[in-house]
Image: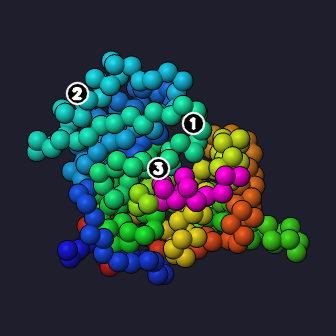
Amino acid sequence: MILLINLLFKGNRYLTGVCYCRKGYTLLINTWKRNDLLKKSISHYATCLGLDSIHIVWSEPDPPSKSLIHTLERAVRKNSNNGREIELKFDINKEDSLNNRFKEIKDLKTDVVFSIDDDVIFPCSSVELAFSVWLSAPETMVGFVPRMHWLDHSRGNRNYYAYGGWWSVWWMGTYSMVLSKAAFFHKKYLAMYTNEVPASLREYVARNRNCEDIAMSFLVANATGAPPVWVEGKIFEIGSTGISSLGGHSQKRSECVNRFVDEFGRMPLVSTSMKAVDSRNTWFW
């Protein structure tokens, strides 16, 4: 397979390679008591040509209703193009935990998952672009929502890391994470998160109901020694504001970063300034 990707890359190195992957990608969508948003998201992503299957991470106390299942199945059949048959499955969890979104799935039909929240939508053109980028760098995370970390020297001699959101990325021009609310990564990282991440780290995530996305970024960076890849894409947020809008969010995320450094025994995140951009929407190279 030879990949010709119509992209403009800016910045430094990333982990490259060609992926001889099975079929397209699996949509791994996390949801919680927002069936209206779930229906909108499933209906939209079913139109994307690279989509091969859909796995819904279900952690609610009651199983999905037959009505919901039939509605989603109809939406997939109606919106899939060219007579494609897209698999739709619910991954039922007995406990409500943020770790559920990264549980190992042994019957995945594809080698790559597109991890997404139920309240964000990206145009199919952006999703297919990111999928193409991932095919050229299949060991790393490729996503739309960059975040960063830095060593906070205001703490004195202590090695304390701070977490930075979008405005920090915009101001500094670098990033070291892409959030799993909208990111491609190899399915093997689900198995690694389930079986190799220290139980104490997963317990910390479950107890604090936060930072599972940072934990996955640590896992991938620790395995590859390479930065993620940020793909430029327009995001449509169709839900209400989440925990990121609450007071003290950045401080809690910084605490997670430092806790994970202790768990991994080092800081594995790698900063980069590279961005993948569709050159068809760029005036010049």
Q: List x then y, in percent, for residue 203.
A: 69, 46
| Disc 2: CA contacts within 10 A as few (<14), some (14-19) or many (>=20) | few
Q: Is 194 included in the stretch rendered in magenta?
A: yes
Disc on the earlier residue, 2 or 3: 2
Q: Which amino acid does label 1 sit on?
A: Thr
Front one among 151 and 201? 201
Residue tagged 1: 241
Do the CB atoms of the residues marked 2 and 1 lie less than 8 Å apart?
no
Q: Nearer the viewer, mark 2 or mark 3?
A: 3
Image position of 77 (left or right of 157)? left
Q: What residue type is labelled 3?
A: Glu
Q: Which amino acid does label 2 sit on?
A: Arg
| Disc 1: CA contacts within 10 A as few (<14), some (14-19) or many (>=20) | few
Residue 64 in sight here = yes
255 shown above or below 14: above
Could you give the CA–CA distance between mark 3 and mark 1, rounded to whole angstroms?
29 Å
Q: Nearer the viewer, mark 3 or mark 1?
A: 3
Residue tagged 3: 104
Disc on the earlier residue, 3 or 1: 3
Q: List x then y, in percent, for residue 118.
A: 44, 38
Quarter holding the N terminus? bottom left
Q: Give the range drawn in magenta.
A: 189-200
Could you give the CA–CA distance between mark 2 and mark 1, rounded to whole angstroms?
29 Å
37 shown above or below 275: above
Q: List x then y, in percent, for residue 31.
A: 47, 35
Q: Residue furthest right?
A: 156
Residue tagged 2: 74
Q: List x then y, in percent, for residue 268.
A: 63, 71
Disc on the earlier residue, 2 or 1: 2
Query: What kind of element bears circle 3?
Result: loop
Image position of 209 (left or right of 2)? right
